[in-house]
Image: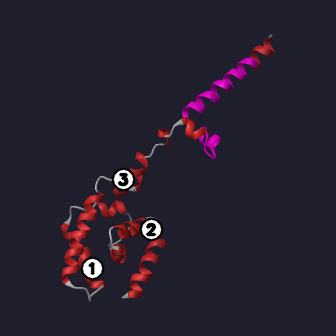
Amino acid sequence: TIRVVQSAPETFRFQHPMGAEVLDWLGRVSLLSYGPVMASHDLHSIGEIASLANDDLIIHKLCRTHDDMYPKRNKKDSIGDFVKLKKALGNLKGRPEGMLLAERLELFSDREVSYRTCMFSANGVETAMAKIPSMVFIILTGVGAVGYGVLTLVS
């Protein structure tokens, strides 16, 4: 049983892109031993797991799978795990970490960073090039330079 606990999380972590995030979350809610359970049920992302928050039957099935993987556990621990898992899943609902990755990307916006912070960072010039004020400045400077060049040639 110890071999399964020690090797399965690492396999899960490296074979599934979101596996590390799932294991980190399980560790934060003190349910790390559920890593192999999530992997065995093909639950590879927190978004997928968060969608189970209201489904007591599936949560019970996860706990039962956990009991099958670790048969020497006491029944009280299983009930406690059910309550802990249900509460942890409920806490994921509506939070960014409980959303699918595509939904999280929709929430991300780099336009909220102040322009001054952007300019004085380590890669400020490159970052500023992605900001709208910089783009407008560059376009206006370019148009001005072309206009000046045309006027110089004409006169």
Residue type beneath disc 1: Thr
Magenta span: 120-148
Quadrant of the snapshot with the C terminus = top right
Dot 1: within a 10 Å radius of its alpha carbon, few (fewer than 14), some, or many (20 or more) residues? some
Residue type beneath disc 3: Pro
Residue type beneath disc 2: Ala
Tell me the CA gap for discs 2 and 3.
17 Å
Q: Earlier in the sequence, mark 3 or mark 1?
A: 1
Q: Secondary structure at mark 3?
A: helix
The residue pinned by badge 3 equals: 96
Q: Is residue 30 left or right of residue 54?
A: right
The residue pinned by badge 1 equals: 65
The residue pinned by badge 2 equals: 20
Label annotation for residue 48: none
Q: Residue at x 22, y 78 (%)?
A: 78
Q: Are marks 3 and 1 in contact (CB under 8 Å)?
A: no
Q: Is residue 105 above or below residue 142?
A: below
Q: Residue at x 24, y 62 (%)?
A: 53
Q: Is residue 108 magenta?
A: no
Q: Is residue 123 magenta?
A: yes
